[in-house]
């Protein structure tokens, strides 16, 4: 039959030459990157299922104007202060936690599907396809639940420590637990010291967890479940010994750890490298004094050597951890360097945590300035990638930046550290929210002090407020830098930043800002001057608003702006060329506050007030001028008399001598001839000269008159 | 003094600079000492005093964006429009003639439509560069559509679906479509005829494509196997000649073949009669008779075939008339 041959040929052709629009079929021919005959497709470049996504994600950089993606991108919902950042993120996570709690409590709703009548049939319900474990309800264990070894295995594998303990207790009461599971449980208990860890699921909680630096104190639970399980084990396997010794050493139960290690060695039980590492890291608790401690460390190392156990990079880290905990001093520093050199000969590179301990050892506060950081950076910059291996690795960058800013005070090194942190995905080494904030505190303060202004400004623009919100001390540093550079517009913006960062109630900062504004006010452009004036006016109003809000429940006394600060506001706001300008109201308000003694202290520059009084008189604001000079007189400043005379001169448009003679006239004649405001000034003059008003009864009366007139 | 205080009641909007906006009003009852009475007739002016609290809301972040920023970082993925993140003075919405369309803030029209702010040309370029390393070189000889058609005649079309849902399955993904040009199949006249009868309306005359779609099996792989099987089976079947196919009569023909029909005999007989060489021919001889010796016979054949195959239309009839006139040596029709 003819058909056979033809179809064979055709079939082969069809099978070989399928061209597909979808990606997978038709790429099975094993050829090189190029197609061999120019027609058949080259072999597929192997990639994992997420490689393309990662490549695309790598094209997206940082947008300094955007908040972190965990927040809503909406002006009303973007957190602007540290408090809000924390509150918003944790609230969102609290919602997730509540949802997962309901999922666990009402698990039947999420595992079965109930069909509509007639049958009311129930079938298993799958929330995802393929199934996702994280979506499944967690089992809840209580004293009545029937548990099996599988439950114990599940709880151990998911690090559900308290559940694991409960299941273990239930199991050991009924049928007992096999040795493998016991060992696994022991490992879990020793690793976490019987304390429930924060689940990896709750990212925000881990990120914002109060990062108090862990104390080097004995926290190991003596006689806890771990100890009980271990002592009940028979025979005690090497794994059990290793586990318990490491757990004790990790939580600084040094003596028992070493005693157990000794016991194990006498029994001829082999110990692992990590056990020795753990022992090395707490060797200092056994001995007192540097030399004895060094000897103990060396003895332990040589013991390792005798046992034929090869050290790894964790060994180096543990040694340095111990050494750095013993204080400073030349001897320890040279010893540490010796150890590092020796490990380098063994081709073991120090990790980030090792470098962290070195920095701790060398760069002490108030110690001599030693630059080990440059060498460390040279080494780290040469590496391909920084892989986190130790929990302490996250301390490196914050410490390095701290050294740059406080110990070495070197902006170039700080730049290098920052560049290293920003490289690839090294940013995960920043640790948590607390560390990140301290890191940026150091970076910003070193930049403010030592970097050129343009660079600092650029840095501030990228960091603030979405990545970092400055603390009050750093804010002061920033204000100082801006003042030195004379950046008036930025200083005016600082006020609104203070408000949104929740720092506006800190009087010291506001006063500092006002000083800075006054110092660089004179040489700014008209537009910027306008901005500065409105900022100053706003400060005054903000103070008032805070006061009014707090009045009903004034538990904490509100700090008030000092008299000097108010003077600064007066000076800034009085610099207008128009009678109708709203700034005059602010000046009046500030003066009123000064007079009613709402401000602390006395103004340091009374001459400002006298010049403002004159200016107010010139622009036809006699009430203001009167208040100003009266305040001066009441406070007993020397400038009061001359200010009175000059202001009155301006107001009445007469030369000084004439005013002098006028003022000598008795009050009754003045009252009829003078404008009420002028009369007040005359009274102020007398007050300043004699220390008492002309007529004490008339004084208060005329006071109220002036106010009404204004 | 009292005057100064009066002008600074809470809720005053600050003049020049936008520092924050007012956003919420909180009602507060001042006289909490009194026992509250239900005031049905509203005798007292008991309107609750409103105190405006302001929350510190920063200005739109679009205002802070530098002009030389990298837009891909600001808008990295598909997202519905958000006015505070887009620094463009966009307007959208239908308004009566002469009015201005509403601006970008609180504009539902802008949020409804899908936007492509995440796929600006520079971003596309950058993304292409990023995934270039996963691409292999295009085979050199496949440099034209013709070459592709020649070497890869069979085309398989499937679709993949991506959802924002926990399941990655989509039932539509199982559908497989196979396309092949009929010209690429090795078929003779009979086989082609039979093949076309087998595929039926899956053949498109305009593009010469046979399209086979399978969605009867639950998995794509099964459907793929099935379309391959369909093509193979149809091809096989087209080449087999069954015994009963020989019984096909003139009436069973699906189209008019002039060579088999009376029309040709009439023409040949007429020609012989006219030229004076009358002879008797068998059926076979009639069929194989070479008509090129007869002037205008070819045109006549075409015209008759068309008349039967395409049906009667003004065009075919006119053509038929014209060729008959030519054949018989009559003058052209004049109207």
Image (cartoon, grey):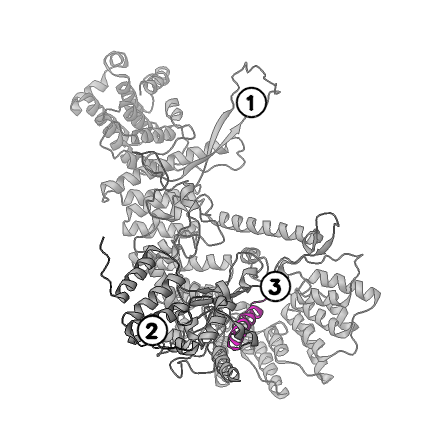
Furthest residue toward right: A174
Q: Is residue A343 magenta?
A: no
Most foreground residue, B94 or A617 = B94
Q: Name the residue beneath numbered marker 1.
A: B31
Q: CA distance from mark 3 to mark 2?
A: 42 Å
Q: Residue at x 46, y 56 (%)?
A: A437
Q: Are marks 3 and 1 on the same chain?
A: no
Q: CA distance from mark 3 to mark 1?
A: 62 Å
Q: Position of residue A642 (x, y in %)?
A: 23, 29
Mark on residue B144?
Answer: 2
**Left or right: A389 in relation to A474:** right
- Please identify, in this view, whether the residue under mark 2 or under mark 1 is nearer the observer: 2
Considering only vertical position in the picture, is A614 above or below A161? above
Q: Position of residue A439 (x, y in %)?
A: 45, 60
Query: Which chain does tag 3 point to?
Result: A
Q: Name the residue beneath numbered marker 3.
A: A130
Q: Is residue B238 magenta?
A: yes
Principal secondary structure, stretch drawn in magenta: helix
């Amino acid at each position: 039959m003819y058909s056979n041959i033809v179809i064979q040929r055709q079939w082969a052709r069809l099978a070989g030459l399928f061209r597909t629009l979808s990606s997978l079929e038709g790429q099975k021919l094993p050829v090189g990157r190029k197609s061999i005959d120019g027609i058949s497709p080259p072999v597929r470049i192997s990639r994992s299922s997420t490689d393309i996504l990662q490549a695309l994600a790598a094209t997206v950089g940082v947008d300094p104007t955007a908040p972190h993606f965990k927040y809503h991108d909406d002006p009303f919902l973007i957190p602007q202060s540290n408090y809000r950042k924390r509150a918003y993120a944790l609230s969102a996570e609290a919602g997730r936690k509540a949802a997962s709690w309901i999922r666990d409590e009402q698990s039947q709703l999420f595992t079965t599907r109930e069909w509509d009548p007639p049958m009311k049939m129930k079938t298993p319900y799958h929330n995802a396809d393929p199934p996702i474990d994280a979506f499944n309800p967690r089992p809840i264990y209580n004293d009545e639940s029937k548990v099996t070894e599988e439950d114990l295995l599940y709880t151990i594998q998911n690090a559900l420590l308290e559940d694991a303990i409960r299941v273990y207790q239930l199991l050991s009461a009924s049928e007992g637990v096999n040795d493998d599971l016991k060992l696994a449980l022991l490992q879990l208990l020793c690793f976490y010291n019987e304390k429930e860890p924060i689940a990896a699921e709750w990212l925000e909680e881990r990120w914002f967890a109060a990062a108090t630096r862990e104390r080097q104190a004995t926290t190991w639970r003596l006689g806890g479940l771990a100890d009980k399980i271990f002592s009940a084990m028979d025979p005690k396997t090497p794994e059990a010994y290793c586990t318990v010794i490491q757990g004790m050493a990790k939580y600084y139960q040094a003596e028992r750890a070493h005693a157990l290690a000794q016991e194990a060695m006498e029994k001829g039980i082999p110990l692992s490298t990590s056990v020795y590492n753990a022992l090395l890291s707490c060797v200092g608790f056994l001995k007192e004094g540097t030399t004895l401690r060094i000897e103990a460390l060396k003895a332990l190392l040589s013991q390792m050597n005798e046992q034929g156990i090869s050290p790894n990079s964790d060994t180096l880290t543990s040694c340095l951890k111990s050494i750095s905990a013993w204080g400073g001093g030349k001897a320890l520093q040279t010893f540490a360097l010796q150890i590092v050199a020796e490990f380098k000969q063994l081709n073991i590179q120090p990790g980030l945590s090792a470098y962290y301990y070195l920095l701790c050892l060398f760069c002490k506060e108030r110690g001599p300035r030693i630059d080990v950081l440059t060498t460390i950076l040279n080494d780290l910059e040469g590496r391909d990638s920084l892989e986190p291996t130790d929990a302490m690795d996250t301390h490196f960058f914050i410490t390095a930046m701290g050294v740059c800013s406080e110990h070495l005070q070197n902006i170039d090194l700080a730049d290098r550290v920052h560049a290293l942190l920003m490289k690839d995905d090294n940013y995960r080494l920043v640790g948590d929210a607390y560390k990140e904030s301290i890191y940026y505190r150091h970076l910003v303060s070193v930049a403010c002090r030592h970097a050129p202004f343009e660079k600092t400004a650029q840095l501030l623009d990228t960091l603030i407020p979405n990545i970092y919100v400055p603390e009050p001390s750093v804010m002061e540093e920033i204000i100082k830098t801006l003042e030195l550079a004379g950046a008036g517009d930025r200083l005016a913006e600082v006020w609104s930043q203070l408000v949104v960062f929740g720092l506006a109630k800190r009087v010291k900062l506001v006063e500092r800002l006002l000083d800075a504004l006054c110092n660089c006010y004179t040489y700014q452009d008209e537009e910027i001057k306008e901005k500065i004036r409105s900022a100053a006016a706003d400060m005054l109003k903000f103070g008032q608003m805070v006061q009014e809000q707090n009045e009903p429940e004034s538990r904490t006394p509100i700090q008030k702006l000092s008299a000097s600060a108010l003077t600064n506001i007066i000076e800034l706001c009085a610099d207008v060329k128009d009678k109708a300008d709203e700034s005059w109201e602010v000046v009046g308000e500030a003066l009123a506050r000064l007079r009613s003694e709402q401000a602390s202290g006395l103004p340091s520059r009374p001459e400002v007030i006298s010049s403002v009084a004159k200016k107010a008189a010139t622009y036809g604001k006699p009430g203001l001028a009167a208040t100003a000079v009266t305040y001066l007189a009441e406070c007993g400043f020397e400038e009061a008399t001359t200010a009175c005379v000059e202001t009155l001169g301006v107001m009445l448009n007469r030369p000084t001598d004439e005013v002098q003679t006028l003022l000598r006239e008795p009050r009754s004649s003045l009252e009829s001839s003078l404008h009420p405001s002028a009369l007040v000034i005359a009274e102020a003059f007398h007050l300043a000269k004699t220390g008492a008003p002309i007529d004490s009864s008339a004084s208060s009366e005329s006071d109220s008159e002036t106010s009404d007139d204004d | 003094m009292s005057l100064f205080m009066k002008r600074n009641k809470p809720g005053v909007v600050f003049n020049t600079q936008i520092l924050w906006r007012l956003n919420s009003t909180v009602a507060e009852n001042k006289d909490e000492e009194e026992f509250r009475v239900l005031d049905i007739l509203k005798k007292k002016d008991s309107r609750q005093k409103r105190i405006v609290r302001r929350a510190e809301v920063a200005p739109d972040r679009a205002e802070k964006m530098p002009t030389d920023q990298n837009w891909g970082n600001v808008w990295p993925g598909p997202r519905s429009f958000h006015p505070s993140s887009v620094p463009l003075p966009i307007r959208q919405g239908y308004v009566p003639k002469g009015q201005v369309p509403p601006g970008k803030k609180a504009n539902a029209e802008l949020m409804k439509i899908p936007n492509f702010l995440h796929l600006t040309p520079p971003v596309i370029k950058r993304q292409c560069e990023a995934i270039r390393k996963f691409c292999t070189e295009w085979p050199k000889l496949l440099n034209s559509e013709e070459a592709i058609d020649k070497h890869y005649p069979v085309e398989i079309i499937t679709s993949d679906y991506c959802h924002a849902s926990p399941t990655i399955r989509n039932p539509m993904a199982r559908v497989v479509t196979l396309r092949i040009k009929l010209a690429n199949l090795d078929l003779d006249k009979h086989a082609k005829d039979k093949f076309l009868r087998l595929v039926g309306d899956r053949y498109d005359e305009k593009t010469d494509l046979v399209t086979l779609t399978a969605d009867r099996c639950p998995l794509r792989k099964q459907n793929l196997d099935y379309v391959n099987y369909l093509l193979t089976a149809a091809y096989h079947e087209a080449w087999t000649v069954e015994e009963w196919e020989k019984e096909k009569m003139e009436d069973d023909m699906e189209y008019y073949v002039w060579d088999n029909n009376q029309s040709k005999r009439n023409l040949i007989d007429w020609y012989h009669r006219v030229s004076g060489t009358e002879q008797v021919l068998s059926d076979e001889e009639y069929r194989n008779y070479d008509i090129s010796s007869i002037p205008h016979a070819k045109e006549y054949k075409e015209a008759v075939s068309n008349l039967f195959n395409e049906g009667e239309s003004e065009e075919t009839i006119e053509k038929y008339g014209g060729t008959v006139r030519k054949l018989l040596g009559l003058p052209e029709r004049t109207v």
